[in-house]
Amino acid sequence: MLEQPNPQLLIDLVKIPMPYGRYKGVTLYKLPVSYLEWFARKGFPEGKLGMLLQTLYEIKLNGLEFLFERIKKEAGLQ
């Protein structure tokens, strides 16, 4: 049985800033693909941040960034 996606992950991507590194303070969904590709090569961090970054990487690779506009609107972030 396939696991259902967690909608909270998408909400977190539009709310949580990158906690460290070159893009410290940048909201996760705004991170450039090149930075996510670097993580894909070097290894994503452990824990929730790593899961969020991997999810974001897949979203951007598949051209699904338009989803963030709806999520931001529904979360009251626009």
Image: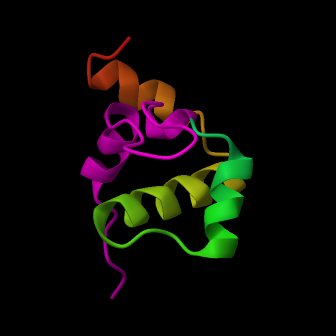
The vertical placement of 33 against 76, above or below, is below
Single out the residue that lies furthest toward the right.
34
Q: Residue at x 34, y 63 (%)?
A: 5
Q: Residue at x 60, y 60 (%)?
A: 58
Quadrant housing residue 61:
bottom right
Q: Residue at x 51, y 64 (%)?
A: 54
Q: Is 56 situated left or right of 63 in this image?
A: left
The vertical placement of 34 against 65, above or below, is below
Residue 62 seen anywhere in this rendered image of the structure: no
Quadrant where the image shows the C terminus: top left
Single out the residue that lies furthest toward the top.
78
**Magenta: main secondary structure:** loop
Single out the residue that lies furthest toward the front.
21
The vertical placement of 46 against 55, above or below, is below
Tally of numbered discs: 0
Q: Residue at x 43, y 46 (%)?
A: 20
- The answer to if 15 sits in the magenta stretch is yes
The vertical placement of 28 against 73, above or below, is below
Residue 18 seen anywhere in this rendered image of the structure: yes
Quadrant housing residue 47:
bottom left
- The percent position of residue 75, horizontal first and vertical second, equals 26, 25
- The answer to if 20 sits in the magenta stretch is yes
- The percent position of residue 70, horizontal first and vertical second, equals 43, 27
- The percent position of residue 11, horizontal first and vertical second, equals 31, 40
What are the residue bounds of the magenta stretch? 1-30
Quadrant housing residue 38:
bottom right
Quadrant where the image shows the N terminus: bottom left
